[in-house]
């Protein structure tokens, strides 16, 4: 696990990070965002809503049949492609979106390639 971004623990942040460019007003008002300079293209971004919808609760319930709650809580996944952009599958299809849409109202877990097993084959 690379890190968590938990809105309920934003007050515990000890490091100040200044983004390269502007960040949305919603994030500035929230007062905290992960240091995106530590995220790498290809990192897996797992998302869990702080106020899950009926569909999100259903996803958790299905995943809870066989997985512990700490692993069954993630109802969405995306791939970080850099510059605060995500590639994700939505009901409208595969799209590029902004990570900031999840900051402040979702628990975010970042899985890095450095923490995932890599398999290299000569086939």
Image (cartoon, rainbow, N blue to C red):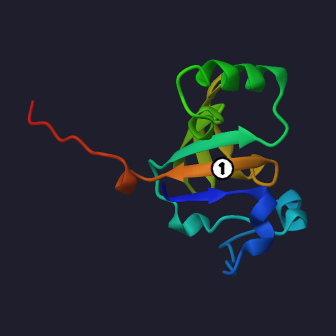
User: Image height check: is 51 above or below 110?
Assistant: above
Location of mark 1 (residue): 108
Q: Residue 72 or 81: which is nearer the viewer?
A: 72
- Counting from the top left corner in percent of width and height, residue 74 is at 63, 36
User: Image height check: is 75 above or below 91?
Assistant: below
Q: Which residue occupies 82% across, 48% down?
A: 105
Q: Which residue occupies 47% across, 58% down?
A: 40
Q: Secondary structure at mark 1?
A: strand
Left or right: 118 in relation to 21: left
- Counting from the top left corner in percent of width and height, residue 30 is at 87, 63
| Residue 92 can be seen in this image | no
Left or right: 53 in relation to 58: right
| Residue 52 can be seen in this image | yes
User: Image height check: is 12 above or below 107?
Assistant: below
Q: Quadrant of residue 63?
A: top right
Left or right: 54 in relation to 13: right
Q: Quadrant of the C terminus?
A: top left
- Counting from the top left corner in percent of width and height, residue 118 is at 27, 45
């Amino acid at each position: 696990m690379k890190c968590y971004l938990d809105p309920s623990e934003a007050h515990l942040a000890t490091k100040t990070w200044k983004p390269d460019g502007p960040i949305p007003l919603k994030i500035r008002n929230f007062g905290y965002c992960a240091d995106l300079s530590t995220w790498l293209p290809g990192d897996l971004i797992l998302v869990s809503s702080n106020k899950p919808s009926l569909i999100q609760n259903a996803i958790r319930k299905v995943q809870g049949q066989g997985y512990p709650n700490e692993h069954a809580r993630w109802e969405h996944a995306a791939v970080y492609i850099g510059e605060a952009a995500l590639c994700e599958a939505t009901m409208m299809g595969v799209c590029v979106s902004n990570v900031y849409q999840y900051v402040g109202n979702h628990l975010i877990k970042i899985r890095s390639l450095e923490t995932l097993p890599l398999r290299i084959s000569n086939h």
